[in-house]
Amino acid sequence: MTTRDGVAAAERIEVTSDQDVVRVRQLVRATAVAVKLSLVDQTKVVTAASELARNTLVYGGGGSVEVLRVENGRRAGVKIVFADQGPGIPDLDLALTDGYTTGGGLGLGLSGARRLVDEFEIDTEAGRGTTISVTKWCR
């Protein structure tokens, strides 16, 4: 069912464990298939979702993920919104720099996720939490 603004009802997952990150991946994959993203674009959006869901868990202390089917009149896509009430990101420019990490990983989480999707928005403030919205459109 699509609303008048081109957004279908969202499915929401609370992210409090590694198993929830797996559930996010599965839901994003199923939604990407349903909107007919190519296999390459399915892989990109699932990879981005996995990274961002893990960040929600590890850095945000848990939160929620909403997965939506969207349309803009010409094409369909998948929109995913990650939200947490964690400490926020004190230096967003630094956090979006390739190679920057606070967790000992490769430092490709935020910057890598941004490259894998068509639209990337982040709203964060130290002490207020973080909301990240990403969209991947069919080609």
Image (cartoon, grey):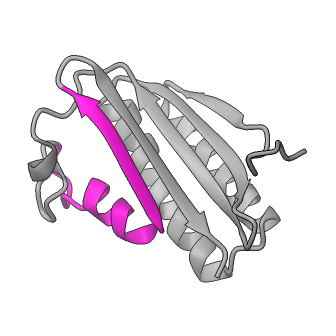
Q: Position of residue 63 (x, y in %)?
A: 46, 25
Extreme residue toward the right, this view = 1
119 in the magenta segment: yes
In the rendered image, which quarter is residue 48 located in? bottom left
- When the figure is inspected, residue 83 is found, relative to residue 51, above or below; the finding is above
At 49% from the left and 24% from the top, the residue drawn is: 16
* Quarter of the image that includes the N terminus: top right
Closer-to-camera residue (73/113): 73
* Quarter of the image that includes the C terminus: bottom right
Q: Position of residue 108 (x, y in %)?
A: 25, 62
Left of 41 or right of it: where is 47? left
Left of 132 or right of it: where is 109? left
115 in the magenta segment: yes
At 19% from the left and 55% from the top, the residue drawn is: 96
Closer-to-camera residue (76/37): 76
Q: Position of residue 103 (x, y in %)?
A: 17, 43
At 71% from the left and 55% from the top, the residue drawn is: 70
- When the figure is inspected, residue 136 is found, relative to residue 50, above or below; the finding is below
At 57% from the left and 65% from the top, the residue drawn is: 136
Q: Position of residue 56 (x, y in %)?
A: 39, 35
Left of 70 or right of it: where is 117? left
Q: Which residues are magenta?
A: 103-125
In the rendered image, which quarter is residue 10 located in? top right
Left of 90 or right of it: where is 13? right
